[in-house]
Amino acid sequence: MSRRSLISIRDLSNSAILGLFDLAAEFAAQPRRRLMLAHDAVMATLFYEPSTRTRLSFESAMLRLGGQVISMADPGASSVAKGETLADTVRIVEGYADIIVLRHPREGAAQLSADMVDVPVINAGDGAREHPTQTLLDLYTIFQEKGRLQGVTVALCGDLKYGRTVHSLVQGLARFGAHMICVAPHGLELPEPFRRTLTAQYGVDIAQYHSLDTAPLGGCDVLYVTRIQKERFADQVEFARIRSSYQVSRKTLERVREDAIVLHPLPRVDELDYSLDGDPRAAYFRQAAYGVPVRMALVAALLGLREVPGFQQPGTSATPASEAFHCPNPRCVTQSEPGIPARALVSEAGNSRCAFCDAEQEVVCPAS
Ligand code: NCD
């Protein structure tokens, strides 16, 4: 089997995603059974940022597949605290595990790791960039609860600038023909490169609102609420100002259809009122629980334990850019990892883009 990793939701075709959903439904139908599919495999979970759901649901998924798990949940208690680079750590862990699940604060960290090792790497969140497995379970939830993805209307609310779950989700929704509106406080709108990609590749133009009060929520099938990503703000005063600027409350739900659902990747802070929990439209705890069968399906497919139609088709490989390149993104993994030369690919628009974090930049001519 050729090795595959999951770095971006773009790495999976629509048919592979639907194939994973079929497998996830099969696993979900026998939730308590411990399978013996992965009995000789070990998963390493490397989490350089806090996590409850993602790490534990991956570990639960691996245990339910019959596999074993080793975990680094606290980088402060590992050689990271002694200054070990990510590249060195993953090369070491490759000797201990058959699959690596990585969460890291640097954008492009998962791609860099996948380039370094010969085992599959799953991106469990790379800074503010992407979180493709959250998108798999978000799409699966919508598919289960609404019966379709094509034509559903989703309101994406909250921190769309730094929220990595949204960055992966908009691409997944666009590909399956969903409609979207964005509702974000000023300054936290969906970043321009994502908007450009959606327009250029899928012909999707997303309407933007700055307040829940003015957004046309009545036409939505799904309200996808996200947390303001406090940890990504350089200015905590700015965070405090924005944090109190929006909340989905019972009053908000009065304008939402009876058959709509409210999703949230969780954890919530103050953007989603606790009084909504008893409302039948609140689907976020079911959504979190879907994480286990969906991640079981993904791990089984990546380890080659189950055939998933369309899964083994390689993604389209981008052309390397020939010019000298300096990644302009201060949050890119190449800015913190010594010995990793910047590498660029040609973007859809014909520009050079960082092979790790996707940031685009005009060409820098080599010094003559
Ligand atoms: C999200 C994340 O880490 O990006 N959490 C998760 O994985 N369910 C969302 C968040 O932290 O706001």
Image (cartoon, rainbow, N blue to C red):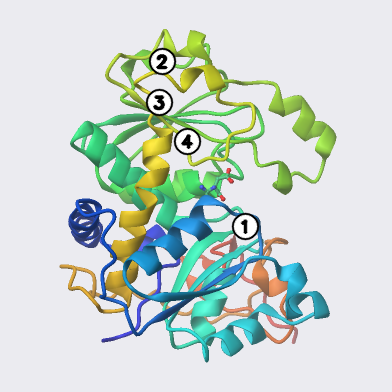
Residue 250's spot in the image, x, y percent? 49, 11
Q: Secondary structure at mark 2?
A: loop
Which quadrant is home to the C terminus?
Answer: bottom right
Tell which tag, 4 or 3, sits nearer the viewer. Answer: 3
Identify the amino acid type marked 2.
Pro
Q: Quadrant of residue 138?
A: top left
Taking 142 as reference, is 254 left or right? right
Residue at the image position 68 percent from the left and 63 percent from the top: 328
Residue at mark 2: 216
Q: Secondary structure at mark 1?
A: loop
Tell which tag, 2 or 1, sits nearer the viewer. Answer: 1
| Alpha carbon distance from label 1 to label 4 | 18 Å
Q: Residues within 10 Å of mark 2 (few under 14, many from 20)?
A: some
Identify the amino acid type marked 1.
Gly
Relative height, residue 273 to residue 159 (above, below) = above
Residue lying farthest to the bottom in this orientation: 95
Tell which tag, 1 or 4, sits nearer the viewer. Answer: 4
The answer to whether mark 2 is within 8 Å of ligand 1 is: no
Taking 71 as reference, is 294 left or right? left
Residue at mark 4: 264
Whichever of labels 3 and 2 marks the residue nearer the N terminus, that label is 2
| Alpha carbon distance from label 4 to label 2 | 19 Å
Identify the amino acid type marked 3.
Ala
Q: Residues within 10 Å of mark 1 (few under 14, many from 20)?
A: many
Residue at mark 1: 127
Asked if the residue at tag 4 contacts the one at tag 1, i.e. Cβ–Cβ closer than 8 Å, the answer is no
Residue at the image position 31 percent from the left and 22 percent from the top: 260
Disc ID at residue 282: 3
Relative height, residue 357 to residue 53 (above, below) = below
Whichever of labels 1 and 4 marks the residue nearer the N terminus, that label is 1
Whichever of labels 4 and 3 marks the residue nearer the N terminus, that label is 4
The answer to whether mark 3 is within 8 Å of ligand 1 is: no
